[in-house]
Amino acid sequence: MRKCKVVFYPDNKQIEVDKGENLLRAAMLAEVHVNASCGGDGTCGKCRVVIDEGRVSRQPSPKLSSEDIEKGYYLACRTHVESDLIVRIPPESRLGEKRVLDRRRTVSACGLLLSPEDALGLVKGWKLDPKVRKLSIQLSPPTLEDNLGDLERLKRELDRKYGIRDFQVSFAALRNLAATLRERNWQATITFLSHGGRERLVQVEAGDRQKYNCGLAVDLGTTTVYAQLLDLNTGKTLVSASDYNAQVSCGEDVITRIIYSQKGENLARLQQLVVSTVNGLIDVLLQKSKRSISDITFMAVAGNTTMTHLFLGLNPKYIREEPYIPTIAFCSLVRARELGLEVGDGVYVYVLPGRASYVGGDITAGILGSGMYQADELTLYIDIGTNGEIVLGNRDWLLSCSCSAGPAFEGGTIKHGMRAMTGAIESVRISRDTYEPMILTIGQTKPKGICGSGMIDAVAELFLSRIIDQKGKFNLDLDTPRVRKNEGGAEYVLTWANETAIGKDIVLTEADIDNLIKTKGAIYAGISILLDSAQIPISDVKQVLIAGGFGHYLELDKAIVLGLVPEIPCERVKFIGNGSLLGARLVLLSKEMESVAEEIARKMTYLELSVNPAFMENFISALFLPHTNIEKFPSVMAALKSRG
Amino acid sequence: MRKCKVVFYPDNKQIEVDKGENLLRAAMLAEVHVNASCGGDGTCGKCRVVIDEGRVSRQPSPKLSSEDIEKGYYLACRTHVESDLIVRIPPESRLGEKRVLDRRRTVSACGLLLSPEDALGLVKGWKLDPKVRKLSIQLSPPTLEDNLGDLERLKRELDRKYGIRDFQVSFAALRNLAATLRERNWQATITFLSHGGRERLVQVEAGDRQKYNCGLAVDLGTTTVYAQLLDLNTGKTLVSASDYNAQVSCGEDVITRIIYSQKGENLARLQQLVVSTVNGLIDVLLQKSKRSISDITFMAVAGNTTMTHLFLGLNPKYIREEPYIPTIAFCSLVRARELGLEVGDGVYVYVLPGRASYVGGDITAGILGSGMYQADELTLYIDIGTNGEIVLGNRDWLLSCSCSAGPAFEGGTIKHGMRAMTGAIESVRISRDTYEPMILTIGQTKPKGICGSGMIDAVAELFLSRIIDQKGKFNLDLDTPRVRKNEGGAEYVLTWANETAIGKDIVLTEADIDNLIKTKGAIYAGISILLDSAQIPISDVKQVLIAGGFGHYLELDKAIVLGLVPEIPCERVKFIGNGSLLGARLVLLSKEMESVAEEIARKMTYLELSVNPAFMENFISALFLPHTNIEKFPSVMAALKSRG
């Protein structure tokens, strides 16, 4: 991707962004304040800028008159960078803004979510060689002299043409064999699944269907389920989709769900709920990609241990009871239909192996898909989901732990929280002078709520602008209508009702902030314990991989201000997005990755935090912004000091 | 089995029988006429004899007064041979009998069905080594330090104790793993299925259940389904049961059923019907043996190609259409539950492989279970079921064919026909003088009907006593009430209503005899074509194996009189009973037999009779008793001549 340099005046701040980047986001990344309250929808008309030099592309907006256009005005939120630019922010767009911060940003990439294709580049040396392949074949019709049975005829030709013999046959593939072979004059396409060094014939289709070979990668999150459809012949990701895990109605976190599962038919119900979520996603993916159900030939699923147990219909009871033992850490292939998944009869599901009850296949997948398992340098892997899992190590060793973080970063327990999808506020800046926000939503439409990255931004900005204190409590003495108190407690208005898609004020409440602080405290404590156990200072960590479904951007600076992660140089950090999905996808694309995944799960050492007395101590210390001991965060301390 | 010599006076005939043989049967085998009309039930009281020398055992009968007993009378049907005997038939038991035939019988064993244990002796060099074994194991309970998942813990111990690793795991076996392992304090029994050189874990039970390891052998007949439960640890046959195939309601023979299967949901219906029959048999076997459903660990099923297709739910359409191609000749393992069989989740079914659409797994099973595949000498295998299949060959080559015989020998299309079960008339003699019958039923109870062996006897006897002619037509001029004509045509009364269990006369009609002649004609024609094709005279055949579910006895002499089989010396013939079941059983007991079965199916050459012009010619010539060309049956010719 070509990089473009954008210089903003009068602040004289510059930033390097990808060609095509939205100009409002470029301003945000450069710490340049532009009023913007409609999330990038083009409807508030507040983010007017003038392009002094360079090329941009723009979308029309009724908020700009032809006169405005003649004068050279653009709405930053509707404008995209096409070359190096010099941009001027006119006074009306900076209303009330007085001070200019002198900190310069030159790197923004650490906040950017890797694209699916870039993410595959994290792992070295793998080759496209999926577990499932389709082979086309032409049989000679039978005669009285050559009267082999249909299956035996097929086997003979597979041996002749491809040298394949001695394979297993899924009985389900044979049900319509006679009709299928005769449908297109004895031309057929055979699907083979390679497993444990053996081939298995799992499907026979009429005609030549070699090019229709899709895999489904699924991340079974406690709160959110993500799915991607991949073309297994090309390795391309075709479409993605996500939805809340329908189990959420039975409990927010894994412990609640385990308790729920112990009564009556609830285990079966939980199984059906998550399967219905996956079935729904399959529908969406097929519609979006205009593919048919029979194109799907294989599935790889990653999730935490409780989620995979519930998905498989296995009783998770002993996951919750000391000594916390799962039924299965390493699962064999399972027939998708047996689980209730609405795919072809010959489709099998590979469930990524986990290490323990609280370090599951999602983490194995992340270690695999992020390439951490190949890393020469010391790496810290942080997966922020409903649970927070942390892994420290490199190609030689892996030490893991888990801390129950809660679903705040996925929108759970947050008043206007939502998943990272269209309409979610994903970036927030708040003017230190006027306390006015500058917000950007996913898809740049009117805001519907706020997702994880938006919350990280918002809480950090509320803290940096002193709207909240170190404990997350509001300063109610400020001269702004955005901070207010009502029956539910204090809150900050991110967007006024008339500028939202939901017709009411979108706020962040003191209770929301409290939840976020607990969540980040648990994760920070987990990181600390892991580093302490290995007796490694954070400065020795050469690479930090952050996984999680917060949004498309994670502002590392803001995450540090929040105290979610220790102070780490930006260039050491990669935000890989959904690590679980990365690994599931890699297993679909390369069969050898399955044994790598199993090796990773086997190799990981697991530290049980629930019986570790230092954990609670660390957790309590981390319930401040950024931390009780602010000396651990020198750059945050400096930033606060620089503004008195 | 110890043999006893029994001499009958005044005929001065002698016979060698097994110790324990019923005395009435001994008389029958010796061609000694004793009046007997209640089938051996002890209720007609007509079969009085006197024991002059030797030991017998007897059951009491109200038909013998204490005076009778004092005088030394016995009812032959209630008396069993315990040593060499001299038996006198008093005049009242021979009422109306004038002539004494001078033919002597010295061998009877060729008519006797082999016992299950003797049948296993037909195959040399196999050893008890079933596909399924159970292993008992004691695990150490998990701790925080030793926190492997349940499955991984189990695998570790299986490796430690038995050196088993690298096996596949059936997902179904894991559903209740957590609870099962904890149920008996971490003691468990693991069931392994060996397939294709690999082990597969298919079941986990709590506690030590090693000794509960049963296999189910099933012969899927077109008319009758036979099943046996075997103890796989000892190789013993525990119990047997049979029932009509519930599909009979949809058609008598395979062609009718194939036609039926082509409409609407009929294929699924046929599948459900035969599965319901098998499920019913499983119930009966478990009740009889006092075993539980979880004892069954494996199933082997043999049947003709149409039957196995319908059992598996595969469309049999192309079996019927030239060039007569089955979907599968060699089937992989199938999960029993998937077919609707009510057995454990981990139970798999092995379906014996067939050669062609009309030489199926039942024949492969017979060639296997009879040991024909090992034979040095030239052997003729004849399976008489609803279809007749014939195989000629030895260890080096096998030539097979099939002729649609019809279900007459299994009781189908015969007015009082029934399966070989309790109450079925299985042996018949008819006095040449009085035309009175001497009958014996299975279980020696009052007759309910007549089974295959009884029909062979009856038709041969009717012919020898000139009650019917060579075409099977009745001589209505005889002075006996047993031969009569009513609206349905001519018939012979085997038992009067008051001596039956069904309250009406049991008869054999001219139409019945016509059906039997067509059936035997088809089989004889098949045998002739096969011998002609191989250019081998019947005299070169050193061994004849006759399979079929006629009853416990097959009188070879009578079968020859009927013209069902060519004239063969008695000592060359073995009546093996249900050959299909023998093979299915052997596959259960010895896993290596599975590849032997596949080798047999592969090796067989198949001769398609439906396109063979000589077949119809041979068939028409065989529609006489014993044959149009009676010179082919010199001994029958001699017997007829000896009586003028």
Image (cartoon, coloured by chain):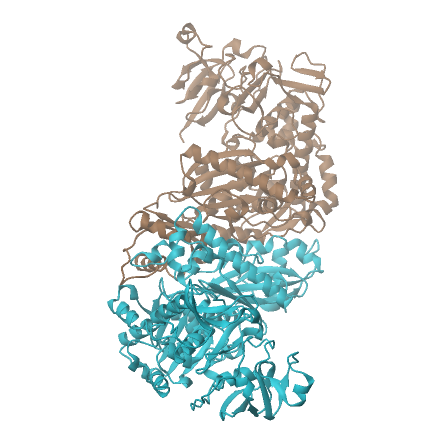
Chain colours: A brown, B cyan
Q: Is residue B459 visible?
A: yes
Residue A144 appears at what percent x and percent y?
A: 27, 61
Identified at 65% across, 25% down, the residue is A415
Is residue B613 or residue A71 the one in the foreground?
B613
Q: Is residue A498 above or below residue A535?
A: above
Identified at 64% across, 79% down, the residue is B63
Residue B379 appears at what percent x and percent y?
A: 37, 79
A249 horizontally vs B331: left or right: right
Q: Is residue B344 above or below residue B523?
A: above
Which quadrant of the figure contains the C terminus of chain B? bottom left
Is residue B61 or residue A153 the one in the foreground?
B61
Q: Is residue A252 visible?
A: no
Residue A495 appears at what percent x and percent y?
A: 59, 17
Count of numbered circles in the view: 0
Residue A333 appears at what percent x and percent y?
A: 51, 52
Is residue B587 or residue A604 the one in the foreground?
B587
Q: Is residue B325 above or below residue B62?
A: above
B403 horizontally vs A462: left or right: left
Which quadrant of the figure contains the N terminus of chain B? bottom right
Quarter-wise, where is residue B255 in the image? bottom left
What residue occupies the far left of the structure in this picture? Answer: B613
